Image: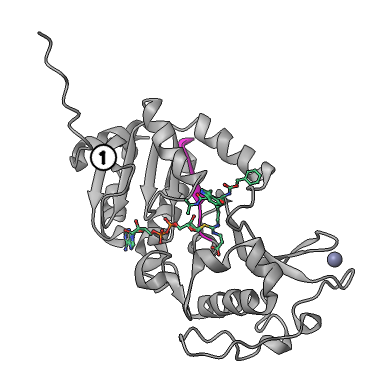
Amino acid sequence: MSEDRVSSGPSTDMSAFRELFAKARNIVALSGAGISAESGVPTFRGAGGYWRTYQATQLATPESFAANPSLVWEFYHYRRELMGSKHPNAAHKALAEFEARLKPQGRKVTVVTQNIDGLHHKAGSQDIIELHGSLFHTRCTSCSQVLENRDSPICPALKDRGAPDPDAEDARIPVSELPRCSECGGLLRPHVVWFGEALDSVVMDRAQSVLRSCDLCLLVGTSSVVYPAAGFAPMLATRGVPVAEFNLEETPVTGALTFQFKGKCGETLPPAIALHPSEQTA
Ligand code: BV8
Ligand code: ZN
């Protein structure tokens, strides 16, 4: 009787991973909030996921913005201002160096991130797809113009507002004093994808295209619960593409993956993607 193959689950063999990575030519790094945790940026899960008495998932919705644009803008203003003192950590930097090192070898590294904090850009990565938009871009709710905006504060009424403490008083800013479009005067919103909103089709097409040619996936610091991003790594694994997860803990997709490297990605990722002896001869 053929023995049922017990799925052995992901390997923790770093040398086996590095042999595969040495041959990979189109590498995709799928990152989530966990890659920015060691930079001091709160993640969505656990304590970090709260701002005042709200979970981020309650505020990151079109319904919340329609009902209370002042509160949602305080939340995003807080996160924008926070980034002024946050910097890329060893994991962001390792990915940026990895991309630069492999380029002359004709090998691609693309960062596909769920994060809106801009730390991959700050670390020097070039090939980045921001699936969920950016804290530092606004979109006009009237004329849809998208602009980069790094103004601090983004409007006078938000100056010194956005305190995260549960007992902080909501600013109740009149909508006329919230960020307004310089073109048409319309109300601006953060150019991010909220829960219940579709991802930008151009961004999605770019992501699908890099995933189609991917021959190695690094899944870094994501809880893999938010779709469609959470479906990317399992889809690759089903296609036989090796996927290595770098996370503090198990996630719903861990069992389907090829490699699992547990720990802080600022410590586990850099040695995993450091120079391989085969590259010297390249
Ligand atoms: C869509 C931008 C359809 C905003 C984000 C019911 C109602 C409504 C919708 C749904 C529903 N059920 C399912 C859905 C779909 C929904 C969804 O998946 N919901 C989940 C909650 C079930 N998805 C959507 O709504 C998406 N759109 O489906 O549209 C559609 C189609 C056509 C037409 C119309 C509609 C849009 C989802 C995008 C939402 N926007 N962000 C903002 O940031 O403010 S999502 C946001 O949360 C992040 O971008 C990220 O994607 C997600 C958080 O996940 P992570 O990044 O993984 O972070 P998290 O904190 O969860 O985990 C951190 C991980 O890191 C942990 O595993 C931890 O262990 C690890 N870690 C921590 N420290 C370290 C570490 N690892 C290593 N080292 C460390 N040091
Ligand atoms: Zn406008």
In this view of the protein, can residue 166 be seen by the observer?
Answer: yes
| Quarter holding residue 116 | bottom right
Q: Is residue 42 above or below residue 215?
A: below
| Quarter holding residue 257 | top left
Query: Which quadrant is the C terminus positioned in?
Result: top left
Q: Is residue 218 left or right of residue 51?
A: left
Mark 1 lies on a secondary structure that is: strand
Task: Tell me which residue sits at (39%, 60%) in the image.
Answer: 35
Tell me, yes or no, whether the highlighted magenta stretch contains residue 107. yes
For disc 1, the neighbor class at 10 Å (few under 14, some 14 to 19, many from 20) is many
Q: Is residue 264 left or right of residue 31?
A: left
Q: Which x, y percent locates residue 233? A: 41, 39
Q: Is residue 134 above or below residue 30?
A: below
Q: Nearer the viewer, residue 228 or 63?
A: 63
Residue on which the image places disc 1: 259
Q: Which x, y percent locates residue 170? A: 60, 87
In this view of the protein, can residue 191 be seen by the observer?
Answer: no
Q: Is residue 176 above or below residue 236?
A: below
Task: Tell me which residue sits at (31%, 58%) in the image.
Answer: 265
Magenta highlight range: 105-115
Q: Is residue 260 left or right of residue 143?
A: left
Q: Which x, y percent locates residue 50? A: 44, 74
Q: Amino acid at mark 1?
A: Phe
Task: Tell me which residue sits at (44%, 52%) in the image.
Answer: 31
